[in-house]
Image (cartoon, rainbow, N blue to C red):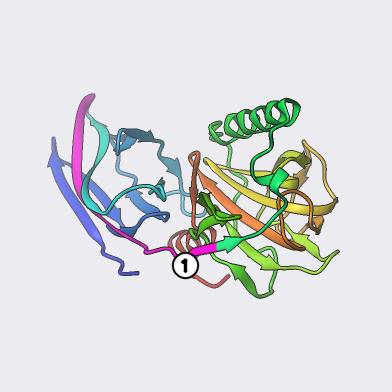
Amino acid sequence: MKSLFLILFFISNLFAVDIKIKNSTIENGRTIFIEFKKEKGVKYKNIEFLKHSYPIYENPVDKSKLYALVPVSYYTKPDIKELKVVYDVAKKTNTAFFMIEIKDAHYKKESIKVSAKKVNPTSKKVQKRISKEYANAMKIYNTFSKHNYITSKFIIPLNTKITSEFGKARVYNGTLKGYHSGVDFRAKKPTPIKCANDGKVVLAKDRFYAGNSVIIDHGHGVYSCYYHLSKFKVKKGNIVKKGQIIGLSGSTGRITGPHLHFAIRVEGTQVDPLEFIKTINKNIFNGDDR
């Protein structure tokens, strides 16, 4: 994907504001990375984009910089949209404007056959369970901690063949049910699954669709998710390290066979996890290797 560097130098009361948008041309389902250089007398407040507000955080490895992650939803249509950076200079609020070009990623479709009871469950007990699990997950994803656990590059949890990429439209038993919110890795049962980076376990439990699931809070609005496990190696509340084994692969939940579903949420929005890793590793840790 094309990366375009935009630098804004705005002089206000002898203060210079330095803002770099590293990928102003972006496909839906990916993450915009914005970098700010700290300047005396300048206070960056937030990002406004597509009717949402996003926080600005301190760079974890370079204290002279700040950064922000702005997710572009899978459902965002191709267009040119305005992004605003709100900041204060000498107690006066200013706004810097940038134009972001959103392109269609042209995600493919795939057809999957599973048990009918996993596609359209009619049991009120099961429906209540699904609703409760969804509400709990969204509460987690929409909790943005300013605490940061990330101090080094992200890794992928498994080095095996990818069997289903992010963004594929999912047609279950002939009915379109949504899109693939993560990446599936081939994983014979029971393959050890590694944590993508340091963080805190905020969920480790069995769920109807995702099966045995682990969700890790990495701080700064970033969560990684690991689904369909056969066994847990961590529990809620554990502090984990990058590369630590958090569970074993399996075939629990709505699934056709054993594999690992790996996903990333940024500020509550699902994004392409491999593109996210590439983006954050390159722009914070000076390298896009995984």
Q: Would you say residue 94 sits in the magenta stretch?
A: yes
Q: Amino acid at mark 1?
A: Asn
Q: Quadrant of the N terminus?
A: bottom left
Q: Residue 177, percent across and down?
A: 53, 48
- Residue 127 colored magenta? no
Percent of width and height locating residue 215: 68, 44
Answer with the quarter of the image where residue 84 lies: top left
Give the camera-side residue of 103 and 92. 103
Range of the magenta residues? 90-110
Horizontal and vertical percent position of residue 122: 69, 33
Q: Residue 117 versus residue 290: which sits nearer the camera?
A: 117
Mainly helix, strand or loop, the magenta region?
strand
One can see residue 22 in this view: no
Residue 59 appears in the rendering: yes
Rendered view: 145 above or below 271:
above
Q: Quadrant of the C terminus?
A: bottom right
- Helix, strand or loop for disc 1: loop
The vertical placement of 95 against 100, above or below, is above
Residue 70 is left or right of residue 163, and the answer is: left
Instruction: Give the residue displayed 62% in from the left and 70% down from the top.
Output: 163
Crowd class of label 1 (few under 14; some 14 to 19; many from 20; radius 10 Å): few
Q: Is residue 54 left or right of residue 88?
A: right
View extreme (bottom): residue = 161
Residue at numbered disc 1: 286
